[in-house]
Image (cartoon, rainbow, N blue to C red):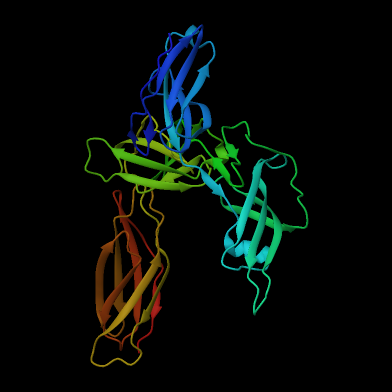
Amino acid sequence: MALAGLFSASANAFIPLNLTGSVSGNDFNLLLPTTTTGFYSLQSSTDLVEWCNTQSGIIGDGTVKVITQSNALSETQRFYRAIPQRPVSLILPQNAAFGVLGYDCGGINEYVTAGFSAVNGLPTGVVQLSTSCSGSGRGGHGTTHTATALVTWDLAGNVYGYTSLGTNQLGPIVSVDGLGDVIYNPGGVAYLLIPTPTKTVIQSAVQSGDQFQVSWISSGVNPQAIQSTVLIATPVNSSAPVLSMVISGPTQMGVIPNVQPQTRYLITAVSSTANGAGPVSAPYSLTSSPATILPGAPQSVSAIWNNLNPTGNADVATASWQASDPGNSPVDEYLVTFSGSDGAGTFTQTVSGTWLSLNYNLDPTPNWNITVQAHNAAGWGPVSNPFFLGGL
């Protein structure tokens, strides 16, 4: 027997939408009251955990929508929920519209007809542009300027490219792309509807140096519509910090840096489209290796005097370097050593492993050799090549 769930997701909260159902033979009719205008997506699940997109782009108009699920009663159990969708308007920005039209008399009107291109699968459409300019002087007549542009958008609604057209040359387009994406054209306005991911699964996570290399799959959505994925590694029974990384674009691989040694982490992933974030993946458990690899020697060590006309017997030397290869645990500190000529002495200073420069007061008369050394949980790594800083 199929069941109607009284649930809807908006942002990260569940809000009742009074989704109800009625039996009609072996079919199941879902009743969705659309009290406000907007778009909705219908999702279904057999266990209230994993959801799949059943129908997208249900237009709200203040009426009760009847959505029939054929042969639904043949299943043992199924739950449904309606999700408000946030459509993206497909428009040509006004500055680009002006470049095509050549006129702007208080605003450019756009009439859009769009769909998915049969050639590249991207949203593509014709934008008819117009602006009305009043006549000048007594008895002047107004003029309406018109032009047409062929526009391609990406799956976030950003303009991918456009060109001016003398006539409507829009090629074959379809309103759905077979991947859950929908384009609607209600009266000269085009809307792109991209569903949120229904499930993200971490396929693998392995340690490389002081990083976790993670791969995942986001389902229920066009893979190219993924705008970003947030990776989070939460330590278990440890005071180590929670690690997070935002991976932009539709890629399904990313890294989480600064992994502490001998620490168990629970790794999760959340993917998002233009319509919002999907559910958090099931956690993937991974324990990092003991710290056994020393950091490498810092590279490109250099230094300068900050004051070319010093007074007194001290001036500021600024040393800088490139980050060391961390080994298999993060660099937690650097040791900077200043060795002076003519008995000027040797001075040392440690700084945080996130710092890549140091200001230090030195006698500007002698020459100085400057070296840097990195430290991680395995110990101190090799010393860098020295940098020679001449006296002033």
Residue 174 to residue 336: above or below: above
Residue for point 39% across, 65% down: 384
Residue for point 31% across, 42% down: 261
Frontmost residue, 161 versus 205: 161
Residue for point 67% across, 47% down: 125
Q: Residue 359: x percent and y percent? A: 29, 75
Residue 22 to residue 15: above or below: above
Q: Residue 85: x percent and y percent? A: 46, 37
Frontmost residue, 194 versus 33: 33
Residue for point 27% across, 46% down: 241
Locate the C terminus by quadrant: bottom left
Counting the numbered discs, the total is 0
Q: Residue 274: x percent and y percent? A: 49, 44
Residue 231 to residue 103: above or below: above
Frontmost residue, 251 versus 141: 141
Report if residue 210 is visible in the image.
no
Residue 126 to residue 2: above or below: below
Q: Where on the picture, by quarter, is residue 147?
A: bottom right
Locate the N terminus by quadrant: top left
Report if residue 1 is visible in the image.
yes
Residue extending furthest front?
139
Q: Where on the picture, by quarter, is residue 255?
A: top left
Q: Residue 78: x percent and y percent? A: 43, 15
Frontmost residue, 195 versus 34: 34
Q: Where on the picture, by quarter, is residue 167?
A: bottom right
